[in-house]
Image: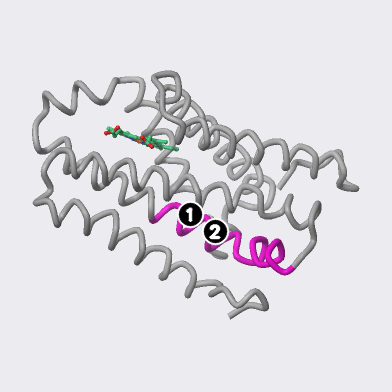
Amino acid sequence: MSDTGFPSGWRFFWLSSAVVLVIGIGVPAAHGFETDALRWGIRFTARSSAVLFLLAFVASAMVRLFPSAPSRWLRANRRHLGLAFAFSHGVHAGQIIAYASQGPQQYAAAVTPDMIIAGSIGYALIILMAATSFQRPAAMIGRSAWSILHLAGISWLWLQFVIAFGKRAAMGGPIYWFFLGLFAVALALRIVAWRRSAGQTSLPT
Ligand code: HEM
């Protein structure tokens, strides 16, 4: 436990992953994995991933701008937030495979080739970032390659979330505008924190 009373480190990771599994798989399972329930599960894990991603994305900026026990918890748990995001998005991938296996026609109607290309790049980056969040692989690629990989990865994923929510926001639905607002605020926080930080010439972390 941390001084926020919130679970930390691996405890947080397992708790978050259990919630994602119980809701993301449990609800579709309760409906016999029928198509609409599976699509609900895909949307649920996209949103749980978005929340976990955003918490990791703003962690350092929050400590710089608003030092407090919760912001220090965020920064101390940034790695496990990232891993919890990777797990949640792994479930998203599993649900997509299950959805595709139910019928190629409905899958082809819901998933465009550009989604597959952008999504696959996103998944490759998630795997690389998750792997290099462990000490040995991180040491193997070195500090500057690590920084470039993680900055490129979070930037790509930020953009992918914004495009995915943006497409749906254009078709209507306040929840999508809400998520777009969160992503805009998160980016603004990072930019303000970066500009205020002493090392303005170094890459933002
Ligand atoms: C090849 C990879 C991927 C495929 C095939 C895929 C497929 C899908 C499908 C079919 C949906 C729509 C579910 C529905 O509306 O019924 C969806 C939703 C979504 N996906 Fe993925 N996805 C992929 C990767 C990603 C990645 C890497 C991200 C983010 C970085 C992402 C973020 C989202 C978001 C934000 C939604 C909208 C959720 C909502 O409606 O609230 N997806 N995806």
Instruction: Please give the residue where the numbered disc 1 appears in the rendered image.
Output: 130
**Magenta stretch encompasses residue 8:** no
Residue 115 occupies which quadrant of the picture? top left
Check disc 1 and give the amino acid type: Ala
> Which residue is rendered at x = 80% and y = 44% of the image?
193
Instruction: Please give the residue where the numbered disc 2 appears in the rendered image.
Output: 133
User: What is the distance, in whole Å, between disc 1 and disc 2 at their CAs?
Assistant: 5 Å
Magenta region, residue range: 69-87
Residue 118 occupies which quadrant of the picture? top left
Label 1: how many Cα within 10 Å (few below 14, some 14–19, many 20+): many
- Is 171 left, or right, of 111 in this rendering? right
**Pick the front one: 7 or 157:** 7
Q: Name the secondary structure under disc 1.
A: helix
Give the percent coordinates (x, y) of residue 141.
58, 51
Q: Name the secondary structure under disc 2.
A: loop
Give the percent coordinates (x, y) of residue 199.
87, 46
Label 2: how many Cα within 10 Å (few below 14, some 14–19, many 20+): some
> Which residue is rendered at x = 64% and y = 61% of the image?
74
**Pick the front one: 20 or 81:** 20
**Pick the front one: 189 or 160:** 189
- Is 163 left, or right, of 17 in this rendering? right
Q: Are marks 1 and 2 in contact (CB under 8 Å)?
A: yes
Is most of the magenta stretch helix, strand or loop? helix
> Which residue is rendered at x = 70% and y = 61% of the image?
71
- Is 95 left, or right, of 106 in this rendering? right
**Magenta stretch encompasses residue 74:** yes
Mark 2 Cβ and ligand 1 under 8 Å apart? no
